[in-house]
Amino acid sequence: MDWDQLATVAQLITGAATLAVAVFLWNQLRVQHRDSERQFTFANEDRQQELILSVHGDAANAELYWKGAQSYESLSPDEEYRYRFLQQLLYVWMWHAWQVKRDGEDLARFRFQWLQMLEFPGQRRFHETWGRKLLGRDSSILEFVEGIYEEQESQAA
């Protein structure tokens, strides 16, 4: 075997090794991507639990939330201010989960959660007054939530 043939064989081996390394690195990137998606999902679920506990786990917040959910108009100015920010936290969290497609293309959990967010008259009054403004930056979620809002309003009538 002369030097030219040896160089050709060495280049073939080097090319094959480079391809093998590229395939290995591509596979590692896929694994890391899946891990980061899983970490995001866990972080999102933890945040949801923290928000729900902050609203319903504290007796004063839970009473305020219940009062506002039942009748937004019955809240004193101080209560209305506090209720508005509790709701805003929930709206912003839901909007963020929507933006990052927390559940992919499956909207079942979003639908269930928005049914709960708009279940009572006070929640729907909040949506009319502030919620639409909060969601107005993203027409896709606003359209989705408006459909649920209309459904809840027609059932209440």
Image (tube, helix red, strand yellow):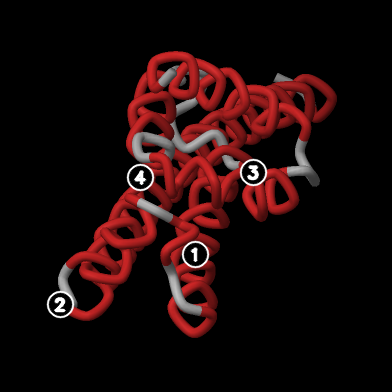
In this picture, residue 33 sits left or right of residue 127: left
Residue type pointed to by label 1 = Leu
> What's the CA distance linking mark 2 and mark 4?
33 Å
Which residue occupies 77% across, 20% down? 5
Residue 126 coordinates in the image, percent (x, y) = 55, 52
Which residue occupies 58% across, 41% down? 100
Q: Which of pointers 4 and 1 lies earlier in the amino acid sequence?
A: 4
Q: Could you say whether the residue bearing mark 3 is in a helix, strand or loop?
A: helix
Q: Residues within 10 Å of mark 2 (few under 14, many from 20)?
A: few
Residue to which mark 2 is pinned? 59
Which residue occupies 50% across, 41% down? 124
Q: Residues within 10 Å of mark 4 (few under 14, many from 20)?
A: few
Q: Residues within 10 Å of mark 1 (few under 14, many from 20)?
A: some
> What's the CA distance linking mark 1 and mark 2?
18 Å
Q: Which of pointers 3 and 4 lies earlier in the amino acid sequence?
A: 4
Viewer-nearest of discs 2 and 3 = 3
Q: Looking at the picture, does residue 79 appear above or below residue 45?
A: below
Q: Looking at the picture, does residue 111 appear above or below residue 77?
A: above
Q: Looking at the picture, does residue 94 appear above or below residue 111?
A: below
Q: Which of pointers 1 and 2 lies earlier in the amino acid sequence?
A: 2
Which of 86 and 101 lies nearest the eye of the viewer? 86
> What's the CA distance linking mark 3 and mark 1?
16 Å
Residue type pointed to by label 3 = Glu
Residue to which mark 4 is pinned? 38
Residue type pointed to by label 4 = Arg
In this picture, residue 43 sits left or right of residue 127: left
Give the number of the disc on residue 128: 3
Residue type pointed to by label 2 = Ala
Residue 21 coordinates in the image, percent (x, y) = 56, 38
Residue to which mark 1 is pinned? 89
